[in-house]
Amino acid sequence: MTEKVFITDDNKATFVCPNCKKTKTVDISPYKNLNKMIRIKLKCSCGNSHTVLLERRKHYRKKTNFPGEYTQVNSGEKKNSGMMTVKDLSRTGLKIQLDEKSNFKIGDRLMVSFHLDDKNQSPIRKEAVITNMKDSFVGVQFCRLDEYDKILGFYLLR
Ligand SMILES: [Zn+2]
């Protein structure tokens, strides 16, 4: 059975009870240093209990403060580009802060590039889609797997 798990910016996970659909929020930050799947047993107020598997490597967000650049890649539109700061990083996406106000909307696609603060200052360049926006903060999800995922995965496990 596939569970839908929602992870918030402060490393809390929201689970949905398969029986009554009630949600429960659990702080997963104590697990963030575990390098494996996490099994969490949840007991709902309806009496149902179920076990979920959480892949920390997939969901754990690391707080960062990297400068970077973005370019809009939607075809047929005037290209917007500018500077940004990468505020957090996970295997699946980023939270960025744009240096300038933008007219982006959810669903717009950006090419983001920045350097990690690892030993090699590894360059990362990925296409991502905007999934949420709040003031100058923009949440993006990576569009596809590519050769940078291995570098990101390694970096997030440090
Ligand atoms: Zn329930």
Image: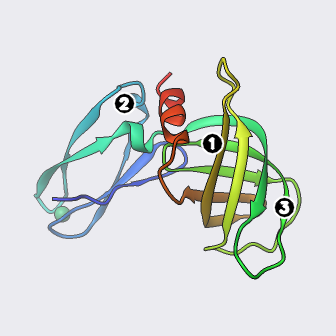
Of the two numbered discs 2 and 1 on the same chain, state the one appearing first in sequence: 2
Q: At numbered mark 2, what does the secondary structure look like: helix, strand or loop? A: helix
Q: In which quarter of the image is ligand 1?
A: bottom left
> Which residue in the rendered view is the most extreme toward the front?
147
Which disc is residue 88 wearing?
1
Which disc is residue 31 wearing?
2
Give the alpha-carbon distance from disc 2 to disc 1, as whole Å: 18 Å
> Which residue in the rendered view is the most extreme toward the top?
119
Give the alpha-carbon distance from disc 3 to disc 1, as whole Å: 20 Å
Q: Which of 96 and 127 is in front in this view?
A: 127
Label 3 amino acid?
Ser
Q: Nearer the viewer, residue 89 or 49?
A: 89
The residue that disc 3 covers is: 81
Indicate the position of residue 89 as horizontal and vertical percent values.
59, 42
Q: At numbered mark 1, what does the secondary structure look like: helix, strand or loop? A: strand
Label 1 amino acid?
Asp
Residue at mark 3: C-beta within 8 A of ligand 1: no
Of the residues tagged 3 and 1, which is closer to the observer? 3
